[in-house]
Structures are given as structure tokens and as C-alpha cells.
Image (cartoon, rainbow, N blue to C red):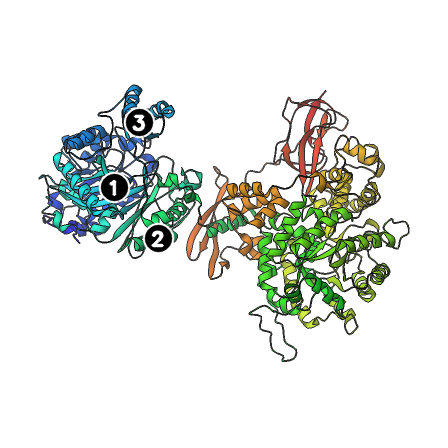
Amino acid sequence: MTDVAETNQVKVNGNEEYGTPHADGDTHSTANTVHQRLRANSSIMQLKKILVANRGEIPIRIFRTAHELSLQTVAVFSYEDRLSMHRQKADEAYVIGKRGQYTPVAAYLAGDEIIKIAKQHDVNMIHPGYGFLSENYEFAKKVEEAGLIWIGPSPQVINDLGDKVSARRLAQKCDVPCVPGTPGPVEKFEEVKSFTDEYGFPIIIKAAFGGGGRGMRVVWKQEELKDAFERATSEAKSAFGNGTVFVERFLYRPKHIEVQLLGDNHGNVVHLYERDCSVQRRHQKVVELAPAKDLPQETRDNILNDAVKLAKSVNYRNAGTAEFLVDQQNRYYFIEINPRIQVEHTITEEITGIDIVAAQIQIAAGASLQQLGLTQDRISTRGFAIQCRITTEDPSQQFKPDTGKIEVYRSAGGNGVRLDGGNGFAGAIITPHYDSMLVKCTCHGSTYEIVRRKMLRALVEFRIRGVKTNIPFLASLLTHPTFIDGTCWTTFIDDTPELFTLIGSQNRAQKLLAYLGDLAVNGSQIKGQIGESKFKGDIIMPVLTDHETGKPIDISEPCKEGWRKIITEQGPEAFAKAVRANKGTLIMDTTWRDAHQSLLATRVRTVDLCNIAKETSYALSNAWALENWGGATFDVAMRFLYEDPWDRLRKMRKLVPNIPFQMLLRGANGVAYSSLPDNAIYHFCDQAKKAGMDIFRVFDALNDVDQLEVGVKAVLKAGGVCEGTVCYSGDMLNPKKKYNLEYYLNVVDKIVNMGAHILGIKDMAGVLKPRAATMLVGSIRKKYPDLPIHVHTHDSAGTGVASMVACAQAGADGVDAATDSLSGMTSQPSIGAIVASLEGSEQDPGLDPHHLRALDTYWAQVRLLYSPFEAGLTGPDPEVYEHEIPGGQLTNLIFQASQQGLGAQWAQTKKAYEQANDLLGDIVKVTPTSKVVGDLAQFMVSNNLTYQETLDKADQLDFPSSVLEFFEGLMGQPYGGFPEPLRSKALRNRRKMDKRPGLYLEKMDFDAIRTKLREQYGGCSETDVASYAMYPKVFEDYKTFTQKFGDLSVLPTKFFLNKPEVGEEFNVELEKGKVLILKLLAIGPLSEQTGQREVFYEMNGEVRQVAVDDKHAGVENKSRPKADASDSTQVGAPMSGVVVEVRVKDGGEVSKGDPIAVLSAMKMEMVISAPHSGKIGSLGVKEGDSVDSQDLVCKIVK
């Protein structure tokens, strides 16, 4: 290896002091600085200072070598670059001109100003780097005229070679092959047309002055020629100040080979072998390789010899590059000589061991190649090197440059990795003014495959956050078979669209910090949360004891024994028979779904289910099932918890392989709130079964058997255990109720005929009294002795345990219960109480009470953790027999009422619920029909409507969307029909369905959904498709949230819901073996300019910061005018909520009944329609606005 920095240097003694300006412009003596002591006894041929007329990484690269050569270094910078790294790496740095005198780019083109700075500060040499003024003949000439040393070819050679046309003439003179092209520069279209008439297409138009792909166009046919010529000349003039171009024949898929040259002042020229620069995008190099991997030796030798021949013919001095194209027949053609150092010179340095910049400086100082030990016979290559240019460009957006602040910067390193960086550091501001390159990563290895793998490793090591980078694209490129083979061509990137199938960095840590920062500044934004958790300590995990041995049960692996084994080994029918043959009454535990839905607004997160999963697999190994999925948990997981419900299901299944899982399926609705096309239900059930679901409790909110049958058939086709379910509504013992024993037995007959494996009885409101339970279950058992019966209830009235015991004694095979700490009231009855009630009897469930109590110690702590979602219920409510509000809905209804300002009118709301139910025809109240009744009740209270007023004004009222959808028939056909004339008056001109809605709906286009999701999110799974089919908007909002904050399911609930304390350390396990250790350090002051605060965290010992919008800053309490009820021109908001859509504009015409806006409050949407025809005026709302009831929306002038 030849180290030219240490070869043949002329040493002089001296200890001169140099004035070194600080950033503030002051100077001080540097005689005793480390740098000065290093240089005190050595100076290159008595030269002392070098200025680099450039920015970014290349000045830093040059400064490093200059320091090794004992030179003082001077940087110049634009005002916009005042914080850039190259300024700090120099001994001295000076701004170019005054602030505002030059544009950011023009500053580095201000040659006279740069020379002036050099003269003022005793500079001896100027190095231009690459780009900017590096190929500017006038600048080089002025440098030399100023008595300074120009590090580069002579101005005359730059002038001769900088013009591509002149370079072609030179090649022809030296008998070096050239691509057929115009003999000189062309300015007129007619000259280009003349060339294509002779040589044909394709051709390439190039700017005669400059490079970098600008002013360059490939033209394939005559029709494109004129436009391409005009665009190329315009671009060239804009970029280089000269619109002259030349034209040559375009070669199909050639390789781009360039030769590194060095010449001295004595006519000597050597080559440093070649580089393969074929991997380009739009003629700009992306990845470079040295030496070329698949170039035949004869072609290589000829190219190297011709390159040297060309350089010698012009008496070339200093560094330069001769560039060639090699076609697929290995014929080569000269393109041009670049009279400067190249970006990719680093790979040549790595394979030859020669410091090219050191050679440049010393040659400029007068050294000969021989003095530097750089004769051709002493230059050889060793191994391979690859360079990747890491830029702040987004490959997924056509390499659009990204700007902003680099929040995290962690670089690669290690054996064979070299980094040449510029502004790549944490805190750097990436502006749109300059080239987007952050750092050049160069790797060296003994073979091509070794260096390719080394580069991949280095790219993976980088962590750059805050701006997009091209690293995912580079990784895709380096793993493509063509690159692995080393056979790329110049248009390889443009010809290979699969390169843009990117696997980007997940950026998990920084996204997580963004959420935690927002939490620290703004508090929890989880809807429904009031205050913080009552319990913030570490949860104490229960220990299950084997009562025979007295030793703890080993839960390192989940239990394998349980009822699910029958399903997996023998199938659904065998499971149903085994359940029926079982002597005891089995228990289904609802803790993982309906219990927390009923008491804690469905807010329990996946992590808190999984934490107790293995213990549960043992304690409940003899349970019928765990009800843990579907129903409201599906959309709430995405909507409020920002979790993937499918991910939850898969995680639970892995941890509990032995207990059957049961989900709630809303018949033809799937897990949505209204009917969907049949194929969507079939697709969903198939995906659920594959993801680990076993038993599907299928119901229809109206007991509409046509709707119910869709879900039943879908489950049977998917291979699941189908529990066809009849919904229980009202008091069957009340002779005034239409839902009597005969009604229920009729529905059961139809469910049995559908082929369901199990019969479910779903008492959503908890109104199944013990005597009614005995009568209903006993009657079904008598009629169907072999049919497994499973009963679900809520303990709203406090009679749940008695009712479930009655069911068991009447012949039910399974009943539902919840862990003691999450039981009672609107939840299910206590599992401990039911087990105790049946213990020792023929109906004994076969569960260990000690194990149940051990599990419950966990849930008692978890309930306190979720205390912000408690509904404030204090005991049973026998009034449920009057209002019949389902348990799962009751807590949500209380919360919705408070959100809409109706909290103080809760008693009135319950009474209105009874009236709303009567108005709707006394319907079965299960999600989503229970929501219809609830929405109508709140609508009546909000608008002070009585039962009779609602009937009388029905043709004028803007009913909630759910009510209108019910009347349309979108939820099915109610028993006894729709109430008239209310239905017709409310619907006005809307459609009426007399059959199940699925028959009116077109099949769902899953291919279109897959295409949409792939385009929008870069990929999708089949379960993503199912989620989108159920809830398109919710899924999109969830994806938008997770793109910003990442996967929050890994975050402990304590820190998901509550602000962390300053100085508090906590851990987050991103995945197995990857743990973040986090600590909140400080919250910065509010920036009045941005409304943001900087939040500082320590992450794994490294300080990181995130900028957070302070949502409390500058908030004005703006009150809206109220609509005057006596003025018919004024339209008011019918309830409190958020405006999600505005469908009119000021001055627009509307007809009576036309929609004006859509209002949303929690899950209830309402269309505000025009009460009469007219012109819109005084429109006072926009999308996203919050409004209170009766706030003025607009006026409609007749």
C-alpha cells in the first residue's frame, strides 16, 4: 500500500503562530493547540493553507487529508450553511458575502468572492471539490491569476475537456472509439432532426456543458423528438447557463465504466484502474463498484490504455476521470473526461491504497508521480469496493428529497467500512437548497460477494430518523439477483420496478417516543378516559398451586389439555356431542371480552390479556371456552386502542392452545354494525378460523332468521363450531310482551334446521329471570334432548347467578360467567359464585375455586389500572326490567350521554329509552339494534321531544343515521313489522327494503381492496383486507395512527394511559430480546412560533428529543351563536358532536331534505338536512368543528 501523504515531503522547521477565527469571528493564538503541535515541524513544500470551495462531505474529506499533510484548512459557507459540519471541521471558516447577498446555491458559485476570501486570509491553494465551480474554466483561470495554486487540471484543459463536443473531437483525433454523434454542439432542432434522419433512433440529447443528468433526454421515436429537444436545452440553460447540446446514438443497456487518472506537471499520466458506475437513476450514479466485476480482460486493458492515451494527448495534470460506455457485445465507446475528482473516488482509494486527494494536493504543489511513488508498475488493486450514496430521498415517492430535522443519527462502522459524511448528525437541519446526500458509505472486501454482504450489513446498522432516506431502496438493490451477479446496466433501476418493493426501517423507537412525548405534554388522548389510573404500580402475578403436591404449577409453557383438543382432532360435531355428553355444566369465561366491554368500555388491551394467558390456560383448562374476540372488541381495538384485532387473536391463540376460543358474530353484519355483502361474511369467517377462532356465536339483533342464516352458513363453510343464537328480549313471563315462549321455540326450530352445532341463548339486557330461564331452557331441552344449549346473560338486575343456576338445572350445557373482580352489574355473573352454587351437584363445572381466585387477584389489579373507564355503577339496577338496556350498552350509553352534555339527564335518558323502544315497535335490543334505540333516546332528550312530539314531527326531524338505516331495513326485518306511519314519515323519500339487505348489495371486490391497500400502505395481509371490509374508515384511521406512532401494543398499559413521571425509568420490549430502557428527562418550554414543546427522553442511555404540538397552547374559548328556533331560516345542530362532513357552500342552492352536513358524536352519526328549499347563507361550520346542541350551522334564505 502506498501512503502518498507520507511520501517525499519536504520538511522545514518552524513554529509559526496562525490566527484561527472562532465561529464568532474572533481570532486567537493556536501555537499550543493540538493541531498546531502536530504540524509545527512539517509543512508541504512550505505551503501552509488550503481553501476548499465547496460544501458538504467533500470539503471534510479534503480537510482530513490536508491535516495529514500539515496544512491549515479554510472553509467557506453560505449563510444557510452556517450550521453545517464542514464549517466546523476546518481550522478557519468564512461566510460568502453578506446575508441575503446570494441565494444558497449562488454563494458557492461566487468565484470572485471566494478568491477574495482566500487572498484576505493568506490561503495558498484552492481545491474545488466536485460540482459547483470545479469545472469552471473562468474560476480556475482567476485563481491562478490571483497567484494561488489551483488543485486541478490547467484552465485550458478544463476548457478543452469540459465541452463534451471538444472531448469527442479529441477522442477521434486519438483514434479512440466514440458513439456516433453530432460533430459539434447543436442549437437548432433542424440539426438534431438531420442527425436522426441519418442514424435513426434511439438517441440521447446531452447538455454540452455540465453533467449530473441535467439537460439529458433519451428519445425513442420521432414524435417525441421536438419536445425532448426543447426540454433538454431549457434545462441545460437553467442548470449551466448554456443551452447548447449535442446528440449521439443511444446504446441499449450498456455498462458505464470510468477510469481514474492521475497526471503530474511533467507529462506523466497513470491510471488507478476502473470503476463500474452502471447503477444509475436518470443518469445520476447511485451505487459504484471497483473494479468492474464482469469486464473481459481485453476490454479492460484497451479502456485503460485509451484513457491514459487521451490524458497524455492534452498534457493532463492532477486527478480526472475518463468515462466510457460498454455495450452488450463488450464494445466500448468514449464519452468524456471529467476534469475533477469524482464523488466515487473512495472505492478506487480502497482497492489501490492510494489517497487520491493527497496526490492531488502534492501534484499541485509540484511533486511528480515518481516522487510520490505512483508509477504504473507500482499500482495494483486488491479485492473489491462498493460505494452507496445515502441520501434524504424517499424512493417510494419517486425519490422526492425530504427535508427536516435529523432526530436520530447512528452510523455504521467496523471492519472494511468507510464513511465520508457531511451533514449527517443528530440535530442537523436538512434544507431543500442543496444536494440530498448525507453520507457516502464505502466498503472493501476480498471478493465481490464479501463486499456486497458487508455493505448490506452496514446499511442495516444505520439509524437515521426524522427524514426519509434511500436506505431501504439500496438494500433492495443490493439483494436483487442482477446486482448479485454484477451484471447491471445504466437503466437497470428504471427497468426494474420490483426494486421499489421496499422493506423500510420500522423506526419503532422514535415513533414510540413520539407517542410518549405527546402523552407527556397533552395527557392521554384515548377517548372515554377520565383522569389517570388509580393503580400505577407493578402488577403482582398470581401463583397457581398443584393441590396434590402443594408445589407451584410450572407455567413456562401453556397447558396442553382442554376441550379444544376435541375440536382440533375430531371436529365441530364431535365437540358438540362431547359437550352434550358431559355430566356437569361447563363455564365460558367472558373476562377477555364481554366483561371488560360491559364495565370498562371495551378498553382492555392485548398486553394485559396476554400477561395472564398461561396461568389462564391451566386454571380454566376445563372451561367450555374463553369468549375473547369479535363484537365491539374488533373495531374498538383499532378505533381506540390502536391495535390490530387479528394480532390479538394470534397472540392469544399461541399462549392458550388448549381452551376453545369463542367470538361474537353479528350474522349478516359480520362484526360491523350494518349488513355487508354475503361474500364479506364468508371471507371474514374463513380468516377468523385460520387465525385460531374455534366457536362462533352467531346472532341477529332482530332474530331475523334470514340474516342469521348468512352467518351460520359462513361459519359452517369455514369449518368452525357454529353456535346459532336466539336473542332474548323483555320478560317472557309478562303476557303483554310479544316475545313469548312460543316465539322463542319457533326461532329455535329454524336455527336447528340451519345445521348449527350448538344453540345459544343471548340475554343482552340481563332480563332473563330464574323462573323464565327454567321454563325456556326446560322447554328447549324437552324438545331437543341432544342439542347442546349455551346461555349468556348480564347481571344488571343482580339475579344473574340465580338465573344461570336455573339454566344449569333445567338442562343447559354451558353458562357464561366473568372473573369475580369484573363481574356483576352490567357484566356477567360471578364465576366464583356460580361455581360455588353448583359445586358438588350434578352440574358441577369442574373448575378449581382456588385457581379461579388466584386469577382474580390479577384482574382486581387490572381493573384499577383501567379505572379511568369505569362508568361509576355502584350496584344492581332492577329497573332494567323496565328500560331493558343491554348491559354492554349501558356503560357506553352513560358515557355517550356525558359526552353530549346529557349526563345530568341520565334518568330522563333511561325513560326515553323505553319510549324509543315503543316508538320503534318494541324490537329485540342487541347490537346494533340496541344502538338504534339508544341513539333515538338521546336524540329525544337532546331535542326535548316527547313520545307524541316525535311521532307528530317525524317528517321534519333529522333522525340519527342509525334510526334511518333501521327503518330502511338495513338491519333486517323486525318481528311484527316496522311501525307505521313513523317509518314512512321518517324516511320521506328514502328506500324501503322488505327482504334482507344482503340481497340488495353487490359482492365485495376483494381484489380492488387488496390493490388499494397495497398502493396505500405498501402491502397488506388477508386479515387487513377483512378488517377493511368490515370498517374501511376505522381501518384507515388506525393505519394512519400507527404510521405516525408505530405499534403501541408493546407499551405497558401504565404508560399507554398515564403521563410518565420525570426521572422515572421503565422498559418496553419491542420484540423478544429487544428492550428499550426509557426515562423522561424534561419537557421544554412552549415555542410561541410553533406552538410546540421539545420533550427529552433518555433511550438506552442516549438522549433523544421529539417535538410535540401542545394542544393546550393558544386555545381560545370560542362560543358559537345559537339557532333561533322561531326563525325558520336558521338551521341548528340537533346534538353536540363533531362536524365530519360539510356538503354545501355559501350561496349554494338546496332543496328540502338535501343534506347540509354530517355530525358525529361517539359512534352516532346524524345527517343535518335542509328543512326547506333556498339559498345557503352564513355557513358557520367546517369539517372538524365541534358544535353544541342548537349551535347555528347555517341559514337557508327562501
Q: Nearer the viewer, residue 381 or 199?
A: 199
> Helix, strand or loop at disc 3?
loop
Residue at the disc numbered 2: 458
Residue 850 locus on image (x, y percent) = 68, 72
- In the figure, is residue 1136 to the left or right of 295? right
> Helix, strand or loop at disc 2?
helix
- In the figure, is residue 312 to the left or right of 1135? left
Q: Nearer the viewer, residue 184 or 21?
A: 184
Tell me the quarter of the image containing the C terminus.
Answer: top right
Tell me the quarter of the image containing the N terminus.
Answer: bottom left
Residue 877 locus on image (x, y percent) = 80, 55
Residue at the disc numbered 3: 200
Q: Is residue 514 visible?
A: yes
Disc 1 or disc 2, which is closer to the eye?
1
| Circle on res. 330 | 1
Q: Quadrant of residue 493?
A: top left
